[in-house]
Amino acid sequence: MESSADARNYTRLTQLVSSNLQKIFKNGQELKNLLSRLGADNDSGELLIELNKRQHHTKDLLEKTADHLTKVKSIPAPESSSEKRERNKMTTRLTKDLKEVSTTFQETQREIAKIEKNSIAKMRSQSESNSEKQPFLNAQGGMQMQQMAAHDLAALQERELELQKLESDIVDVNIIFNDLGKMVEDQGEMIDSIEAHVDNAQDKVVKGKSELEQAEENQKKSRKKKLICGVILIVLIIIVILIIYFSIPK
């Protein structure tokens, strides 16, 4: 049975989920804008760090929102079948919306990873080329060139580390996506069950009403028959009395 505290908690959590959905959608648009710059000739490690920072924040927001929805499902349902049905429809809609934005976010994550892998491959190729030239540079005393090569290697390692974090986030979001799919399926079955109970209750009400109307009709017919029988009996009595009256000699 739902308490007033449960009702307030339900309202708070659903409003929080709705607010987070808007934030996730906005973050997704910002990520796409950053994505359009990633992989360009003039891109930098700072851009990748900023992009991964934002996508990681969005992933955390997805996890928190999915957790809020799980808590919503655990709140005791109201007694009213109609309220219960409306609440489940609301929860299902929010879950589907979150699943939809997570799908878009997954696509953005994969696109980021794809472009970044290509960029890292170019950096690795350049680093290997510099390594092959290293003996020549040492012989020529190219200290500045050696420092540049070391800097490039450090940048490559940093971007590879960021890529690993991104791939880990992709796995986490995929888990969230699968969980949301299961939640939508369970919620749909719950709504079907509630509607089936409501339909069954309505059928019983209709059947009960029909039986009541039939009983009333039968009762009316019974009263009508009794009334007719009564009238006939009275008429017969009157006839008998008249016969007796006129048969007595005066």
Image (cartoon, grey):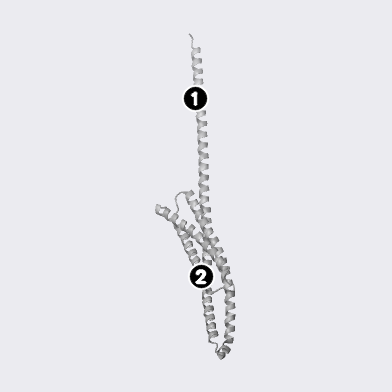
Residue located 53% across and 71% down the image: 47
Dot in front, 1 or 2: 2
Residue holding disc 2? 50
Camera-nearest residue between 242 and 147: 147
Name the residue located 46 percent from the left edge and 49 percent from the top edge. 80
Mark 1–mark 2 distance (CA, rounded to whole Å) = 99 Å
Looking at this view, is 226 or 206 the one in front?
206
Q: Give the x, y percent position of residue 161.
A: 51, 76
User: Which disc, if any, is residue 60?
Assistant: none
Q: How many marks?
A: 2
Q: Is residue 215 visible?
A: yes
Circle 1: residue type: Gly
Give the labeled residue for mark 1: 230
Please determine whether, in this image, residue 214 is positioned above or below residue 134: above
Vertical side of 138 occupied by 52: above or below: above
Q: Amino acid at mark 2?
A: Glu
N-terminal of the two: label 1 or label 2? 2
**Callouts 1 and 2 close, C-beta under 8 Å:** no
Residue 123 horizontal/vertical position (percent): 57, 78
Of the pair 223 and 194, the residue shown nearer to us: 194
Would residue 181 be seen by someone viewing this image from the given angle?
A: no
Q: Where is residue 197 drawn, in percent x and y?
A: 51, 50
